[in-house]
Amino acid sequence: MEADWEVELGPDAPVLDALWSGWVDLRANPERLAEVAEAAHFPPLGAALLALNSANSPLWTAKCDLWHLRPAPDSAKPDPDDAADFDPDELDADPAETAFALACYLDCLPRAGTVFPTLATAESWARTAVTHLRAAHLRCCRADLVLRRAVATNADGLGITTYLTACGPTEAPARQNLAQALAAFVQAALTLQ
């Protein structure tokens, strides 16, 4: 599986607001998964949310989303201003496997301490997770872990937004590839106790 990580900090960088007004606490109330619309649209995302918020997970999630993508025109690199484009080369995909694509993200924070307290701690976690993800024998999908500032109640530190992208020749294989990418991320996360 293609995977990488990066740091996105600075005055104009997004901040992960862990306890935003629409947050559903799946740690305390897993039965509230039905309130997460994205999980209803894509059940493997719901399964990942439940696993990442379970008692044996080192993480918890604050937010997620799911959307469709399109290949960058004429094999050109994606326009950085158009988040709906993707580069098939970054998914280890043949041209015939890129007709349909979708992506999701999960805002993840550590269960211990509510946020990663230092950049070194978050970076270490991301590096190890990426190593696990790269070992997964999956094509047509990619994971990008973005370390960014996070706030949760009185805690201020870092969180990780995990972007997962997958493609396929039709919708069904693309959805299956994204489900496998989600499962690989969950497996990596649960391994990193």
Image (cartoon, rainbow, N blue to C red):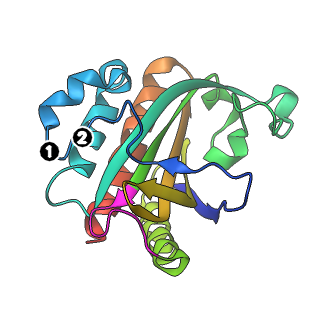
Badge 2 element:
loop
State the residue position of label 1. Answer: 28
What is the span of residues highlighted in magenta in the rendered image? 109-117
Q: Quadrant of residue 75?
A: top right
* Cβ–Cβ under 8 Å for marks 1 and 2: yes
Relative depth, front residue between 30 and 168? 30
* 113, 162: nearer the viewer: 113
| Number of numbered markers | 2
Outermost residue to the bottom? 120
Residue designated by label 2: 25
Residue at the limit of the structure toward the front, as seen here: 154
Q: Position of residue 139 (x, y in %)?
A: 52, 46
Circle 1: residue type:
Ala
Residue 91 lies left or right of residue 16; in this view the side is right
Q: Is residue 114 left or right of residue 104?
A: left
Tell me what residue is drawn at x 49 percent, y 19 percent.
171
Q: Residue at x 62, y 45 (%)?
A: 91
Q: Is residue 58 left or right of residue 87?
A: left
Query: Residue at the spot x=73%, y=57% of the render?
Result: 11
Task: Decide if residue 126 is on the left or right side of residue 76.
Answer: left
Q: Give how far across and how far down residue 160 sits, in percent.
A: 49, 57
Residue density around tag 2, few if under 14, some if 14–19, many if 20 or more, within 10 Å: some
